[in-house]
Image: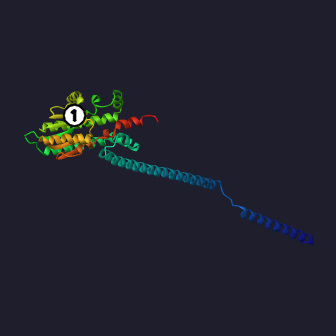
């Protein structure tokens, strides 16, 4: 080969080698600066990111619902505890109202709802039924003597309280009270249970003496009301004389019981829903206290609750 041929071959070989090295450098640059991903792999990667996002959102929603549920339960527990506390407080306050003859105006506002709920939820009916059953059980276990001197005293104002002619309230006031369904419900229950007790005691041969705080001038309408309500054949109906109107009711009842004692009567039991009739001497062998939400001047409490401030 001529010198010119050798020279051309060397140049061609050098160019080829240079091109090959440049290609390797370019390939190396591509591999170092990124990586190749097919469209299928890209789809899978994006789908995975969406799935993870959805799972995260779902987890956040579940946690939010759980927290709200726990908060609601906690609030419910607090409300139940508060209601129980208020009910317990009012129960104790009601008891001491009776023991100390508190006036209706001293009724705490926090207990107004509790007094109404006592009737509305049926607890008053259950307490009344239990008390009447206990009284019937006791008098069913003893027998009056044949001399007619074993007597049972009943507070007749528990019966007469719903008679507007026998109350010191105006007809307008009574009409307002009659609009209160809960108060009327309590009165109806009380009269129904007391009448049942009265009939059983009378059928068992117990002489029944009825006592009232009302003046003697109310005797005629009181008798008419009692008869119309189903009460009959009582041994005596005692009402206040004019001289006794100024007396405290507890003293008045004690005076009347003492008079019975002097006359030879044996008081076997005294029954009332108010403490003034169950204090003092000569109460007899047994005293029975009927539950009585009406004693707390509940009509006025309901009226005050509906009076705009």
Q: Is residue 159 left or right of residue 264?
A: right
Instruction: Write the residue at 20% across / 41% down.
Output: 255
- Colour scheme shown: rainbow
In x, y percent, where is residue 221? 23, 27
Above or below, 72 against 105 in this view is below
In x, y percent, where is residue 113? 38, 41
Quadrant in the rendering for residue 307 = top left
Q: How many numbered marks does the figure carry?
A: 1
Instruction: Write the residue at 37% across / 40% down.
Output: 105
Above or below, 32 against 136 in this view is below
Above or below, 240 against 59 in this view is above
Question: In this orientation, which residue lies closer to the viewer: 18 or 174?
Answer: 174
Instruction: Write the residue at 33% across / 27% down.
Output: 171
Q: Residues within 10 Å of mark 1 (few under 14, many from 20)?
A: many
In x, y percent, where is residue 196? 20, 37
Q: Is residue 292 left or right of residue 196?
A: right
Q: Is residue 236 left or right of residue 3?
A: left
What residue is disc 1 on? 239
Quadrant in the rendering for residue 179 = top left
- Work out which residue is located at the far left of the displayed protein and give it: 146
């Amino acid at each position: 080969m001529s010198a010119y041929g050798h020279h051309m071959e060397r140049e061609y070989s050098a160019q080829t080698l240079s091109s090959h090295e440049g290609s390797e450098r370019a390939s190396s640059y591509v591999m170092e600066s990124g990586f190749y991903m097919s469209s299928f792999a890209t789809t899978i990667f994006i789908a995975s990111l969406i799935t993870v996002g959805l799972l995260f959102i779902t987890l956040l929603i579940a946690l939010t619902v759980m927290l709200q549920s726990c908060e609601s339960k906690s609030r419910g527990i607090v409300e139940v505890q508060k209601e129980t506390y208020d009910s317990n407080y009012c129960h104790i306050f009601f008891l001491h109202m009776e023991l100390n003859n508190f006036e209706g105006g001293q009724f705490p506002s926090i207990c107004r709802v509790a007094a109404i709920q006592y009737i509305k939820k049926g607890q008053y009916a259950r307490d009344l039924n239990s008390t009447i059953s206990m009284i019937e059980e006791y008098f069913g276990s003893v027998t009056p003597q044949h001399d007619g001197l074993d007597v049972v005293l009943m507070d007749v104002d528990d019966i007469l309280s719903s008679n507007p002619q026998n109350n010191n309230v105006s007809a307008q006031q009574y009409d307002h009270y009659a609009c209160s369904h809960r108060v009327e419900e309590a009165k109806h229950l009380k009269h129904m249970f007391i009448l049942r007790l009265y009939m059983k005691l009378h059928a068992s041969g117990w002489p029944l003496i009825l006592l009232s705080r009302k003046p003697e001038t109310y005797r005629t309408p009181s008798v008419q009301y009692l008869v119309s309500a189903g009460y009959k054949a009582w041994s005596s109906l005692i009402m206040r004389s004019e001289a006794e109107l100024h007396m405290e009711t507890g003293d008045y009842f004690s005076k009347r019981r003492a008079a019975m004692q002097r006359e030879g009567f044996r008081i076997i039991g005294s029954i009332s829903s108010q403490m003034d009739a169950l204090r003092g001497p000569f109460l007899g062998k047994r005293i029975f206290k009927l539950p009585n939400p009406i004693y707390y001047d509940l009509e006025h409490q309901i009226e005050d609750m509906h009076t705009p401030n």
